[in-house]
Amino acid sequence: MLLLSLSSSACEKEVVEQKPVVETIELSIIDKNATAETKALYANLWTIQQKGTMFGHHDDLWYGRTWYNQPGRSDVKDVCGDYPAVFSVDFAEIMDNRSSTSSANAIRRRVILEARSRGEVITACCHLNNPLTGGDSWDNSNKTVVKEILTEGSATNIKYKTWLDKLATFANNLKDENGTLIPVIFRPYHEHTQTWSWWGKSCTTEMEFIDFWRFTINYLRDEKGVHNFIYAISPQMDGIQPADDLLFRYPGDAWVDFLGMDCYHGNNTAAFENNLVNIAKLSKTKMKPCGVTETGVEGIIKDGKPYTEYWTNEMLMPLTGRKVSMVVMWRNAHDPNNGGHHFYGPHPGHESAPDFVKFYKSSVTFFSNDLPNMYAPVKNVNVF
């Protein structure tokens, strides 16, 4: 009896002292030669979405409703005292025919460096001009633009490669104060599911779009040696849409790192919830981080009036419990005379500002000061 008792106690002690098994997560990035910081950011995107959602704002460090190009300024910070965790910017003027005359590219570099100096995440879209017609992004008058880009040796193919060359030069010289390349979540050809752009569904066949996406990555990664990009796709998901719409003209798992969606659902909370559920499920299935890459209501209104509880009702509640890494609001246009209402984020004086502070204080949302080191490796998350 005594021996049995001692044996039992030893077994119980052994069970108590066993350490819990920590699962190792394996993530695959499409650029196997990505920089260490880029792979670390990728791991952190996955990890942070298990805990909450980073708040982002397009052009937030560049201009606000009443100010322009003032280092350190931010409409978001003016409201809540902290910067967004994600800074969104546009790379188009670096690349296309505006690059030689744009005075904004120096500012663009400055604000990216500012965001990186605080450890924030940078993402970039591209409202590129039409390389065939000379029109803007919304010029979908010619249905052969992408076909011409993909025709090796054509005038449009040669021109477009020079645009990619300029982006590669910018990316390969985008370095922090320590001389380390800055990772960017690159989001080309956004909202490809709609008809407004020259790369959208009205101007391309399914295979043309897929080939165009792959052509771009091949050129930047393999020919130009850009290794600090995480490639994000972002279909437009405004209404209650089936999960399959997230994979409309999907280039394949070997060609996409980040599953995004642009969700201009207005005040249709049910649509936002539906699409959040679907993208979170797809993220888990494909083992790729996900996020809302653009969203918002122009003017932050409801029924024609300022929506004072927009942030807690339309953002915080649907995001709670959803495993998405980020939610990025579209820009606040510089409009010091308040002549219009083209703004999607908070700013001082707007009726929703107090509600945004509640949103900011939630444990669900992450801002700049809440971030871990997003550019350091994550224990038990391997990126290959």
Image (tube, grey):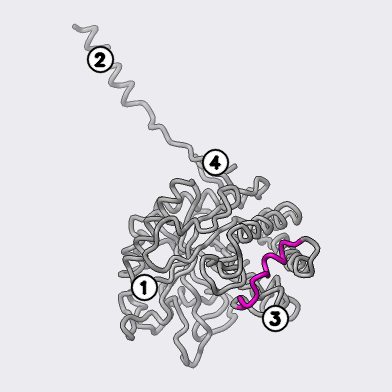
Q: In which quarter of the image is residue 90?
A: bottom right
Q: Give the range drawn in magenta.
A: 139-151
Left or right side of 16 for 105: right
Q: Are the two marked residues, 3 and 2, in contact with CB atoms closer than 8 angstroms?
A: no
Label at residue 103:
3
Query: What is the residue that sits farthest to the right in this orientation?
Result: 153
The secondary structure type at the circle numbered 2 is helix
Q: In which quadrant of the rendered image does the N terminus lie?
A: top left
> In the rendered structure, which disc, 2 or 1, sits on the residue that comes first in sequence?
2
Tell which tag, 2 or 1, sits nearer the viewer. Answer: 1
Q: Where residue 193 sits: x, y (%)?
A: 51, 65
Judging by the rendered image, the residue that carries numbered circle 4 is 382
Label 2 neighbour load within 10 Å: few <14, some 14-19, many 20+: few
Label at residue 8:
2
Q: Where residue 128 sits: x, y (%)?
A: 64, 72
Judging by the rendered image, the residue that carries numbered circle 1 is 356
Residue 255 can be seen in this image: yes
Q: In which quarter of the image is residue 103?
A: bottom right
Q: Are the two marked residues, 2 and 4, in contact with CB atoms closer than 8 angstroms?
A: no
Q: Is residue 372 above or below residue 10?
A: below
Residue at mark 3 to residue at mark 4: CA–CA distance: 41 Å
67 or 332, which is in the foreground? 332
191 or 289, which is in the foreground? 191
> In the rendered structure, which disc, 4 or 1, sits on the residue that comes first in sequence?
1
345 or 161, which is in the foreground? 161
At x 48%, y 66%, the residue is 236
Q: Quadrant of residue 218?
A: bottom right
